[in-house]
Amino acid sequence: MGAAFAAPAAADSPDDVNLNGNSFWEGEEVTFNAIEGSSLSGDKVIVTADNGDGSVVKELPVNNGNATLDTGAIGTGTFEVADGSNTTSITVSDQDLTLEPEFDSVSQGDSLEISVDSARTGYNLTLTADGLSTSDLANALGAEASDEDDYVLIQDVSSTDSITIDSSSLNQEEYNVSAGVEDTDAEDSFSFEVTEQSDTNIEFGNDGTATGVLGDHNTITVNTDDASSVNLSVTWTPDNEEITIFNGTVTANSNSDQVKIPVNTHELLKGATQDELIGEESGGSFALDYAMNASADYDSSPAEVWSMTSSFDMELTQGGSNEDRGLFRVTDRSTESLSTYAISQDAYDEISGGNNIAAVAEHGTATDGTIAEGDVLVTVVEGTGFFGYAENLSENGVELGITHTNPGFGGDEVTLDQLNNGLVTNESAGQMAAFYQIPEDNESNEFNVTFDVYSEDDVDEGEAFNPYTDTTESFSESFTVEEPTLSFDSDKYEVAPEEGQEITGTTNIAPGNEIRVEAGAYGDNGFVEDGTGVVQDDGSWAAAIDFSGEVQDTEFDLEATNRAYDDYADDGKLVDEAEGVIGEDVGATPSLSISTDVPSEVAVDEDATLTVTVENKADSGTAAGNISITVDGEEVTSEELELEAGGSQEFTADFDTSSAGDIEYSVTTTGDDGDQDDSTSGTLTVAEEDPGTGDESEGSGDDDEGDDEGGDSDDGEGSPGFGVAVALVALLSAAMLALRRQD
């Protein structure tokens, strides 16, 4: 919009104005010569208030057939104007004028936008500023100055408009600006301060883009540098018309230069409040000034807007200066999986207090079709696009449910109630979980867990659907409830009179539960000892008990229990019993024992292999550690290994027998405690000839050596081509031939 100096507009010619139900803005001056089409008669015109009492507001003299009315002198309202012969009504209204700068200050060199609002359109706006000449003000407004007026005139201003002040040529000080209308009494004023140009680097994080899933929170990151606050606006420009989606002020904490603002995309475009639209900020705060209601402000539903665009523009401004621009972008939602887990009550207490849903898999186990009474069932959904309305899933076409599938004819369906009164969510991990206690008296009951996200096409009219889903998504898991069970692995245990003696067993209750094992003997050598085992993913448990100092051959009783599940067991008690005895040479500490198989002597180029067998000879317990095999000063094997009780593992190493001499070897095992478990060593002799086979053995060597070399011998003894064995065979053959001839 241009701004220019201009003289006041010339008054209308008297014969142009006929009062006939006219409307005027307060402050307008009108000269007229007729009322209701008839020329003025008499020497005065009477203006009375149209309030029923006929009180005179103003008398206007008639000069040369003309009368002049200053509407600013009579105020606003409806009035009757009469000259004694003719009467008409006129209305005088307040034009109103409001000028409001976008910011109270502007950095020198930046621009400041001032909004201009009035009840009138097409008027001329006048501006003056204290301490600033009209030419300097016109220059700051980008207008041309006039020599004959004391104000800057901006023509043809609409009812909702704006003007922009360029502070480049202004001094660093505060300015008070007065505004008026050329032909009415409407006026207003505002002030702003020009400040020193800031050196701060205010910008959006993440390369200027905030990307999130539609239906979830999309986090805008603002790097505020040294600035304490900055203005954020998110806009959309359909059909070349900028529309504000939301805006507000970002304020950084004193010890932070980055503020993260989670925006709930589910509440966007709905005229949401601060609490509805903005999640928990970090590094500072965001104060919402305005949030668009698409239905009211744009005549479109939020879903219709999202169908037209998946991104909005972002802008950071400070003191009227644009600091950075960015993109607010959303992507489509999806559901990845539904899983069910069994966890212990203790694990539930730990997990449900926070949002560490990943700990469900760490502390529990997949139901795999069954779960025990008393366990806590966890349903875990992995996906995106429902965290913005997680507390109102059903209202948005998302259903998580559990159905009893075998109540039997005439039977009542069992309902599993959620613990924690709702979902536990972890938006950053894309997970949400619901927890259910499996109640007693449900043995053999079957249940089906379902998670459905319904599209609009798959629901009846009036039913809830998900606005972010084009195709219905459905997931399900089934399980059967079992009675909790507990058992020892053996009816009778032999243990050594030492600490750390393991008593083992199995159960079907959830991993993480503790099994208490008590060992008790009575009589002269009586004792009571106990230990605790933790249930593993496979249902096994092992309790270590200290039997140190107990007497040999003492028999004792064993009892394993978990009192938390007593109410769910058929007998009212989850327990198992076994027997034990303090035995001799049992309970040896697991270790890695070595045995070897290796020749003591071979001939040159004859194959020779060191075979090592490592065993855990203990009756129970796992032996873990390292094996090292060294041949001829070089370590040829170094491996980690772990052996269960009675287990073994074999290793081999080949010798280089290409030349005669002695080859030393050694084998060592080291436990996982760093101490040596076992070791052995020896020497393999590689001789020039194969002992006891003479030249025949030598002659069968490598083809490269040839048969001639094979006949040589160090001692020269023996018959060429024959050995002792050959001679014996010949003698036996001759004897048998003689016997046959005699027959």
Image (cartoon, grey):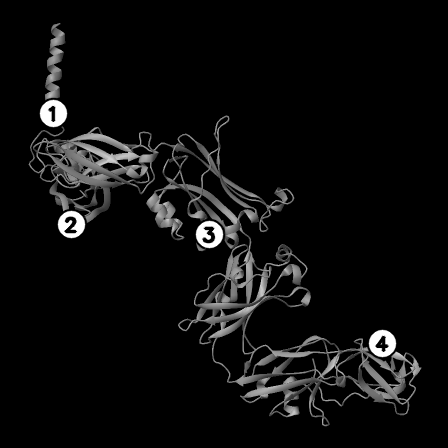
Q: Is residue 308 above or below residue 623?
A: below
The quadrant of the image that shows the N terminus is bottom right
N-terminal label among 3 and 2: 3
Q: Give me the disc on residue 430.
A: 3
Q: Give me the disc on residue 633.
A: 2
Q: Is residue 116 left or right of residue 556?
A: right
Mark 2 or mark 1: which is in front? 2
N-terminal label among 3 and 1: 3
Q: Position of residue 87 (x, y in %)?
A: 88, 79
Mark 3 or mark 1: which is in front? 3
Q: Is residue 74 left or right of residue 465?
A: right
Q: CA distance from mark 4 to mark 3?
A: 68 Å
Q: CA distance from mark 3 to mark 1?
A: 81 Å
N-terminal label among 4 and 3: 4
N-terminal label among 2 and 1: 2
Q: CA distance from mark 2 to mark 4?
A: 120 Å
Q: CA distance from mark 3 to mark 2?
A: 56 Å
Q: Position of residue 218 (x, y in %)?
A: 51, 60
Q: Give me the disc on residue 135.
A: none
Residue at position x 8%, y 30% in the image: 718
Mark 3 neighbour density, 10 Å: few (under 14) some (14–19) many (20 or more): some
Can residue 380 be seen here?
A: yes
Mark 2 neighbour density, 10 Å: few (under 14) some (14–19) many (20 or more): few
Q: Mark 4 highlights which residue?
A: 21
